[in-house]
Amino acid sequence: MDKGQLEARFEEAKAIASKASLFLLSHEDLRSEIDEKGENDYVTSADRECERMIISAIKARFPEDPVLGEESGRSGHGSVRWIIDPIDGTVDFMASFPNYTVSIGFEDEDGLAFGVVSIPRQGEVFSAMRGCGAFLNGRRISTDEKTPLGESLAILVPPHRHHEHLKPYLQRMERFYSVVSDMRSIGSAAASLCYVACGRVSMYYELGLHIYDLAAGAVILTEAGGRITFFTQDESWLDIAASSASAHAAMLECING
């Protein structure tokens, strides 16, 4: 896809993310309308309504573009696709915890091309297009390559949906404790990647993600100078290690032992 076509979609993605964020802020009452999709895996009426709104806006402007949405699956076929998570961090949304996000990514023939991650309750919009840098509310961001690891934070997310992986995960967490100052888990893969991208944390590690959880955030982190290692290739089960460039070797050592 040529740069002009990509830029048009990128600008539309930012506009759509803004509208979706306003929708979620004004419809937080929908967080009480909940269905359970699996163990510790929930969907609210807001997830479904927000995804419908996002896809409708995309189709109005780019009717031939395929879309992959968390709730509705894939529509259309072709060499490009939009990758949508209407609420990444549904449990956060349900609990009125402020780190839920709207995540909109786009993939073309050359791979992940742009990403927009909006955190409605914080008024923050992270965005990046391949080769053009990463931004927070229009200001350029980069990973933290200066803070010593022993003074930094890491986001480590225990496998809350797959308890059979908990014991080896806790062993890795113990190794992380010897490297960083402290740990957090904020409930959104998209936000976690963006927090690494803007230097708030040095590392982020999680198991069992889906492509829609991280497509947008992965572009933002990479464009901010960070690094990502995927330990699996199945889009429905992605284990990732994401960090600043300077922290990546230490992070992989913690994971691999």
Image (tube, helix red, strand yellow):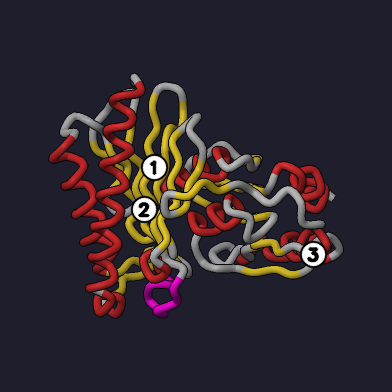
Task: Give the quarter of the figure containing the N terminus.
Answer: top left
Left or right: 67 with respect to 106? left
Looking at the image, is mark 1 or mark 2 earlier in the sequence?
2
Q: What separation in Å lies between label 2 and label 3 (alpha carbons)?
A: 33 Å
Q: What separation in Å lies between label 1 and label 2 (alpha carbons)?
A: 9 Å
Element on which disc 1 rests:
strand
Residue at left 38%, top 27%? 108
Q: Is the residue marked by circle 3 packed among few (<14), some (14-19), or many (20+) residues within 10 Å?
A: few
Q: Kindly report which numbered mark, 2 or 3, lies closer to the viewer in this rendering.
A: 3
Looking at the image, is mark 2 or mark 3 earlier in the sequence?
2
- Is residue 97 inside the magenta stretch? yes
Is residue 97 or residue 230 the one in the foreground? Answer: 97
What range of the chain is rendered magenta? 91-98
- Looking at this rendering, what residue extends furthest in the left direction? 60
In which quadrant of the rendered view does residue 44 lie? bottom left
| Label at residue 238 | none
Q: Is residue 114 visible?
A: yes
Residue to which mark 1 is pinned: 105
Is residue 198 or residue 190 the one in the foreground? Answer: 198
| Label at residue 85 | 2
Residue at left 78%, top 59%? 172
Element on which disc 3 rests:
helix
Labels 2 and 3 touching (C-beta < 8 A): no
Q: Position of residue 111 (x, y in %)?
A: 46, 28
Is residue 225 or residue 169 the one in the foreground? Answer: 225
Is residue 43 or residue 19 the one in the foreground? Answer: 19
Labels 1 and 2 touching (C-beta < 8 A): no
Q: Is the residue marked by circle 1 packed among few (<14), some (14-19), or many (20+) residues within 10 Å?
A: many
Labels 1 and 3 touching (C-beta < 8 A): no
Residue to which mark 3 is pinned: 151
